[in-house]
Amino acid sequence: MRVVSISVNGLEQAVEKGFFDWLAEQDADVVCVQDHRMRAYEVEDKNLIPEGYEAYFIDGELNEHGGVGIYTRHFPKAIMYGFANEQADREGRFIQADFDKVSVACVLAPCALGREEELIGDDDLTVLDHKDEFLDAFGVHMQKTLRKRRQFIFCANLQSAHHVTDASPLYHKTDFSGFLPHERAWLDRLFDEMGCIDAFREINKQSNQFTWWPEQTEGSRKKAGIRVDYQLLTPGIRKTISDGWIDGSTRFSDHAPVVMDYDIEIGF
C-alpha cells in the first residue's frame, strides 16, 4: 500500500504545474491533498480527478482556509467529514476514509507563519492562537483515536517541525511559527506521551529532510527548509513500514510530497 501526502497550495495551479503528471508515475493507492483552496464540487466540475481514482473532498467556509481531500483507487467503506470540532470542521481541515484494514485521514492545521500576532475575528484572537486551538483539539482527537483497536494513518500538514534536525538554522534563530517552543512541546506530547508514530522518521533519521520552503522566509530550498508534513501512525502498524521518501525535486508546490509504502493490503 502506497500513501502520498502533499500540501498543494491550490490544487488547480498544482495540476497546471505537473502534479497529475508526477502522480501518474507514483502508483499510489491513496493520495491525501491539503490546502486545495477551492469548493469541493469544483474538483469534479473542473475535472481535477486523476485517472483511475475516486475523489472525496471537504472545503472550508472560505477558500483561504485551504480544505483537504483524498484520492483513492479503492472504494472506502465510509468517509468521515470532520472530527467533530466545530471550528475545524467549518474550515474543512479533516477528512477520513475507512478501508477494510486501515483508515487514512487527511489533516491541515492553520498556518501562522509570518502572521503570528495578526488579529482575526472580534475576540482579540491572533492567528497563532487559532493554530494553537486547532492543535489542542486535534490532540484530543488523537488521544481518543490511539485508544481504539482500529489502525490509522494521518497524512497531516501540522505547520510545525519537531526536532532541530527537522528545521534549517534560520528557524533556530527566529520566532517564526512552526518551530516555537510550545509548538515543539505539542509534538513531544503527540509522539512521546501519546505514542503516535512519525512514519518517515522510522526509516530516515538524517537531517535536512525538509518538506516545505515557505515564501514568507524569503529563503531558497537550501536555506529555509522545514519538515512540517507527516504521516502519523497508530502503533499497531509501525512494523508495516517498508519504504518512504520526500520528493524534493517536485516544483508544483512549495511543499514536497511525502511518499510512504506499507505492508498493508488495502483492498477488500
Image (cartoon, rainbow, N blue to C red):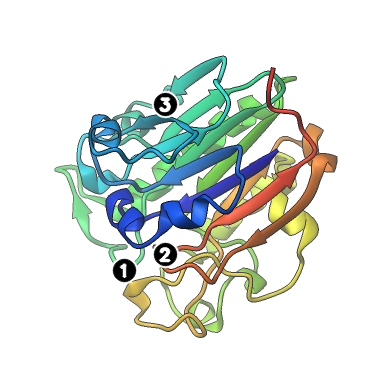
Give the labeled residue for mark 3.
82
Residue occupying the point 39% across, 70% down: 214
Label 3, label 1: how far apart the Cα atoms are = 27 Å
Which quadrant is home to the N terminus?
top right
Residue 114, quarter of the rendered image: bottom left
The three-letter code of the residue at mark 2 reads: Ser
> CB of mark 1 within 8 Å of CB of mark 2?
yes
Residue occupying the point 71% across, 50% down: 199
Q: Earlier in the sequence, mark 3 or mark 2?
A: 3
The three-letter code of the residue at mark 1 reads: Gly
Residue 175 percent across, percent down from the top left: 42, 73
The three-letter code of the residue at mark 3 reads: Gly
Q: Is 133 placed left or right of 99 in the picture?
A: left
Residue 234: mark: none
Give the labeled residue for mark 1.
114
Label 3, label 2: how far apart the Cα atoms are = 25 Å
Residue 177: mark: 2
Which residue is most to the left?
122
Q: Is residue 141 above or below residue 65?
A: above
* Mark 3 secondary-structure assignment: loop
Residue 263 percent across, percent down from the top left: 80, 38
Label 1, label 2: how far apart the Cα atoms are = 7 Å
